[in-house]
Image (spheres, rainbow, N blue to C red):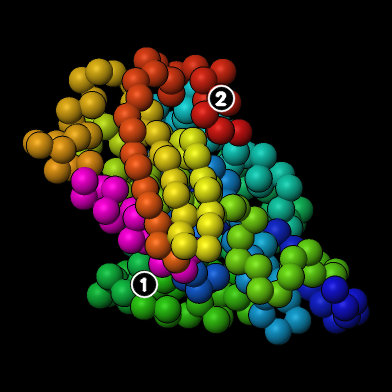
Amino acid sequence: MIENKNQRCGFVAIVGRPNVGKSTLTNALIGAKISIVSRKSQTTRHPIQGVLTRDHAQFVFIDTPGFQTRHGGAMNRMMNRVVTQTLSEVDVVVHVVEAGKWSEGDENVLPLLPEPGKKHVILVLSKIDAVKNKAELFEFTTRIMAKYQYGAVIPVSAVKNNQLDILLDEIAQRLPDGEFMFDEDTLTDRSMRFISAEILREKIFRLVGDELPYASTVVIEEWNEEDKGVHINACVVVERESHKPILLGAGGQHMKRIASEARQEIAEMVGKPVFLEVFIKVRKGWSEKESALRDLGYE
């Protein structure tokens, strides 16, 4: 890798309450889908690094789980630890708040932010395309700025690609000088195997009812890549026997659709045919046991 004294490179945490648009923003900034997205909380469970190289700057974005205090349990404690640890390690923090909507969840994120002046913190107001009254947005921003001393405030719409270049410019000037850590064509630190498991989990979140997604996870038990295609054996782990018929659906239709949509998306990612087999396994109370979480690949 060629050294360039004008290069900047650093880590950028994307933080906020659940369902505020962090993963959508991360994907939009990178220009590729590396984080799965759904309307349910707990969609993002692992810290995922997304890499963008732009001119003389390399951004290493870390999409974090939504920080929340409403629910306990080993899973939520683990996700909250991921957020606090990430904040301690990055160069720039992007705090995402939905434009015009401040909640208790947003309030709970404030104490996690670095002491003003110790790190660069940017406030991003997401989903501004949904705000009709711009005067109200100004008042909303003023109220938030009274709560914390942000270095910049950038309203964006990740879906419409609105003002993302401005956000990137603001982040770039706050990155430390340094050589690029990744090749310029790298998009993420995660493997295709990991992303495939996440894609399958996303389909479960989107296509099954409210209870099951939170009690399920996905493990890729076998991944064999050949010239003709990729053969994948995936296991969906649930907490109760009663979850299996919910996941399967009448005549197995739920699972067929989940597997079909996942297979199509994985095939687009790897650029070759995918042969996907999905099994269901019951592991009682896995989300409440830290040892089980570690066994299933959680950090």
What's drawn in magenta, residue-wise?
256-271
Residue 239 tag number: none
Measured as percent of width and height from the top left, residue 218 is found at: 42, 37
Q: Secondary structure at mark 2?
A: helix
Please give the name of the residue rendered at 25% of the width and 18% of the height, measured from the top-left corner: 241
Q: Residue at 79% x, 69% y: name it.
A: 180
Residue 110: x %, y % from top left: 54, 45
Q: Image quadrant of residue 121?
A: bottom right
Outermost residue to the left: 250
Query: In the image, residue 78 lies at what x, y percent?
Result: 55, 30
Image: 146 above or below 59: above
Query: Which mark, residue 159?
Result: 1
* Residue closer to the observer: 38 or 222: 222
- Out of 119 and 3, give the one closest to the viewer: 3
Residue picked out by circle 2: 295
Q: Is residue 227 above or below residue 80?
A: below
**Type of amino acid at the residue the image marks with label 2:** Asp
Residue at image position (53%, 63%) is 227
